[in-house]
Structures are given as structure tokens and as C-alpha cells.
Amino acid sequence: MSNSRTDAFPIARRYAAAIFSLAVEAKQEMVVVDEISALGRGVDENAELQAVLANPLISRKQKSEVLAAIMKSCRPLTQRAVATIGASGRGELLPIIAEMLRKMLAESRNELVAEVI
């Protein structure tokens, strides 16, 4: 990722907040969070996809097309959100955005996450 993880948080937080707000308004928060989380895991686990999203020689349009192809079976809201992220050249932030969305969903449902050591 070209940005350090810490620098990416404020940017990712804005995307996550906007996406979550739209998902809540559409009553699709669980589905949208699940779909973006799956994509975030895919980015984390696929070195080739990471390389494409981080490569400055690949245009934003091409990166958006790659993400759109992956997300073609998702809800339209998810597709639009990912298209916006890709068009902005922020596709490499998808794992962080997904993580924040999961936290927002848990908070909205008054869920607590416990870590067992």
C-alpha cells in the first residue's frame, strides 16, 4: 500500500462513514458490509490484485474496471461504492474500509467484540 496504514485511516474512515450511511438509509447495511468485507479479504489475500491496485502505471479507470468485474454480482449500492473508491484511486484501502464498516455495523447493533487471550 502506498500510504502508511496510519495515514490511510482518515481517508478510509470518510469512505466507510459515507458507505455505511447510504447502506443504513437503504436498509442494506448487513449485505453491503458483507460484500465489501469479502472484497477487502480478497485484496488482502491476493498479491496480484494488491499489485494492480497499488501500481501507479495502471489508470484509475482500469483499476475501477477490475473492481467492477469482481463486484458484478453484488448489490447496486455496493457496486457504486466500490466504483467510487476505484475511480478515486483508493482501491488499496478496501481492506481498511471493510474493517471500519464491520466495526460500524457491530456498533449499530450494540455488539461488543471480545478478544480471548
Image (cartoon, helix red, strand yellow):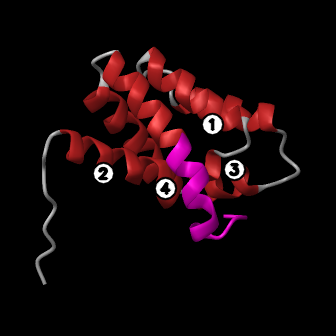
Query: Which marked residue is nearer to the observer: mark 4 or mark 3?
Result: 4
Q: Earlier in the sequence, mark 4 or mark 2?
A: 4
Name the spot of residue 37 as percent of width and height, x first: 38, 44
**Which residue occupies the foreground of this view, 12 or 40?**
12
Name the spot of residue 49 as percent of width and height, x first: 62, 51
What range is drawn magenta here? 1-14
Residue receiving disc 1: 85
**Which residue occupies the foreground of this view, 58 or 91?**
91
The residue depicted at 32 percent of the width and 24 percent of the height is: 24
Residue receiving disc 4: 96
Distance from Cα at disc 3 to Cα at disc 2: 24 Å
Residue receiving disc 3: 53
Name the spot of residue 5 as percent of width and height, x first: 58, 68
1 and 3 marks in contact (CB < 8 Å) = no
Tell me if residue 4 comes above or below residue 64 in the rendering. below
Q: Amino acid at mark 3?
A: Leu
- Residue 32 in sight here: yes
The residue depicted at 54 percent of the width and 43 percent of the height is: 14
